[in-house]
Amino acid sequence: MSTFLVATAQYPVSAPESWAAFEAGVTRWVDEAADRDAKLLVFPEYASMVLPALFAEAVQADLIAQLDAMQGLRDAYVDLHRRLARERGVYLLAGSFPWRLEDGHFVNRAWFCAPSGDAAFQDKQVMTRFEREHWKISTGEPLRVFETSLGVIGIAICYDSEFPLLVRAQVEAGAELLLVPSCTDAAPGYHRVRIAARARALESQCPVVMSPLVGAAPWSPAIDTNTGTAGVYGPPDRGFPDDGVIAQGQLDVPGWTYARIDLAPTREVRRDGQVLNLRHWPEGSVTAAVERVSIT
């Protein structure tokens, strides 16, 4: 399937009163997009961090205690998204989850669920200062790409999108569509990720889908403030908008942003675009000696 509708979420933080309320909320979001015939649904980084609202106030106030307590919900969390993907016949990127490994370390893990009910995951590779210094989140398993009936998809979780060589590795492994779930607490962070998403679309000559967490959760030391705009970006070249903006939401307003994705222009622009960034990458990434010249 080279043409399909993608739905990318500006997903609002909340304080669900029960697991049932959380499940009902996610279900409503999925139903809304699936009813529009979206085939790929993208939720943001750390959308799972509303779950500590279910715990006692002492746990809510303690970042490490939150991570420990959330492990009791992680299987139900993945099962919910797998079931919704299967029931609605969609590919669904669940909001990433702080996942404890057998050695006790935590990683930032995003589960990608298929219409069959199967699921696989992408772990974040490079942690932000907050993740390193306050949460002690670690690098997880290596990069992957996902072969789907929609095409080959890569996932670059928030900060990862700001490192061109990470995404380049996914593209060289066959990725022709990139998903960037994000969680940023201030405008500079949002713009960093948005600029990175657009730069990766330019370099990789393919669509990039960005999904941010939005809104305020004063009770949470992790996701107390969140800002961003969902967007779908492509290379400014044949078959794409002149500015590369395929679709974009309204800043901080919860809701889905929809875009029609056609991978035929991606394949064509990579073959015969006005420029050939993907093919010419080696020429622009050669490490060369640099001569320092004084002209004072």
Image (cartoon, rainbow, N blue to C red):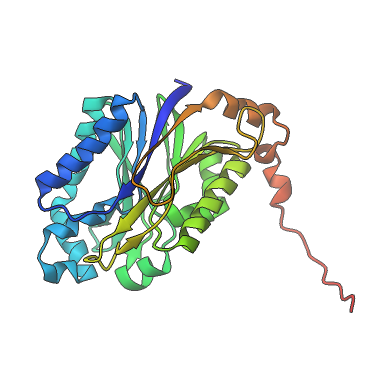
Residue 132 vertical position relative to residue 148 in the rendered view, above or below: below
Answer whether residue 169 is visible to the viewer in this image.
yes
**Residue 56: image x %, image y %?**
9, 65
Residue 9 vertical position relative to residue 117 in the rendered view, above or below: below
At horizontal 72% and vertical 53% (from top left) the residue drawn is 286
Residue 225 vertical position relative to residue 283 in the rendered view, above or below: below
Residue 278 vertical position relative to residue 218 in the rendered view, above or below: above
- Asked where in the image residue 61 lies, by quadrant, the reply is bottom left
Answer whether residue 175 is visible to the viewer in this image.
no
**Residue 16: image x %, image y %?**
15, 52
Q: Which corner quadrant holds the N terminus? A: top left
How many marks the image carries: the answer is: 0
162 displayed left or right of 296 = left
At horizontal 33% and vertical 46% (from top left) the residue drawn is 254
18 displayed left or right of 152 = left
Between residue 259 and residue 80, name the one nearer to us: 259
